[in-house]
Amino acid sequence: MAAYCFFIVFVALSTLLVNSEAKLIIRVDQSGKGDYMKIQEAIDAVPSNNQEPVYIKINPGVYEEKVVVPVDKPFIILSGSKAANTIITWNESGEIFECPTFSVLASDFVAQYLTIQNTHGPGAKAVALRVSGDRVTFSGCRILSHQDTLLDDNGRHYYVNCYIEGDTDFICGNAASLFEKCHLHSVSERGGAITAQRRVSADEDTGFTFVNCKISGVKSGSAVLGRPWGSYSKVVFAFTYMSNAILPQGWDDWRDSAKQNTVYYGEYKCYGPGAITKTRVEWSRNLSTQEAQPFLSKDLINGKSWITLAPTSSKNSTSAGNINGGH
């Protein structure tokens, strides 16, 4: 018990994020009271190959637009006031790299207090968020769709206090990502999957790790924790509450039994009615403390050197209106 309490304290301390000082602040407001009325316009205003943090403050509203942070726009910090009233929404299905509501291609990106949703509905690939840059943080965000909700594509990523909702493979891709204190909600009625991790080689240092998370669902026995998009798919859940939405088998081989020999699917000290490991498929792992330890800190993604949050004040900062002439 003492060791467990120590771990809880450790995780609480480890989630403290370093503040950034942004020299440039851009304000987005739909009523015209900011520098821009659209989020994409604000991102477009950031200089190419920028080397200093740019803070884009989004005022409450429903922003119906498709947003891309291009690869040559690093060091952007995008922040709403709270996720419930700052919503980025789009309705599109199709090829997973083309249909996302929000795509992050740049590195050193931070988003917080936003809802990002694809409203297309069930039965088709409809990505809400694509993350393909390195050193990317999402904090306090809601990410909503049905199939392939979060395309966690490539790079090192950190998600904390986020709510992620979907039914089929709704966290998918081949990034190296740590999810802390996130709520995963399955809206699947049957045959759903929380994750579809795409690691294709034992040499790849990628995978999804969930620590101190919560899994809920709309129906009992309606989803598995994961299935292998790639032959070496790697997913670990630790200290996570699992509702009865999770099927007793826990994991699925996606109709390819050969992958049972190469995937890495582990659980460590999870709890709740969906976390009974004695009913799991025999090729998943009930991790020992020693086996789980490498997955339990930000060292997993070298995160201590880059994980950050938006600045808490704009003191000594310059508005984009003074630089770019305003809206």
Image (cartoon, rainbow, N blue to C red):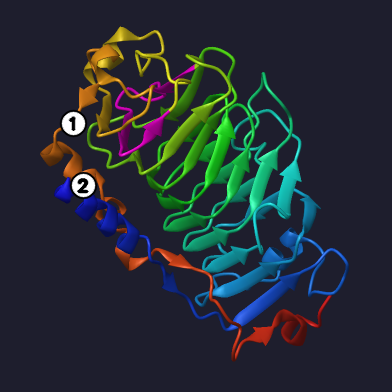
Query: In the rendered structure, which segment of residues is drawn in magenta?
Result: 223-242
Q: How many marks?
A: 2
Residue indicated by mark 2: 4
Q: Position of residue 322 (x, y in %)?
A: 75, 87
Upstream in sequence: badge 1 or badge 2: 2
Q: Indicate whether residue 231 is drawn in magenta.
A: yes
- Graded by Cα atoms within 10 Å as few (under 14), some (14 to 19) or many (20 or more), the crowding at tag 2 reads few
Q: Which residue is mark 1?
A: 287
Specify whether residue 260 is in view: yes
Return the x and y of residue 107 as percentages of the image width and height.
48, 59
Residue drawn at x 84%, y 63% as measured from the top left: 30
Name the side, left or right, on which 304 lies relative to 121: left
Q: Position of residue 39 (x, y in %)?
A: 73, 61
Badge 1: few (under 14), some or many (20 or more) residues near its Cα, within 10 Å? some
Measure the alpha-carbon separation of dots 1 and 2.
Answer: 15 Å
Residue type (three-letter) at the residue carrying disc 1 = Leu
Q: Amino acid at mark 2?
A: Tyr
Q: Please tell me the numbered disc located at residue 272.
A: none
Give the camera-side residue of 276 and 68.
Answer: 276
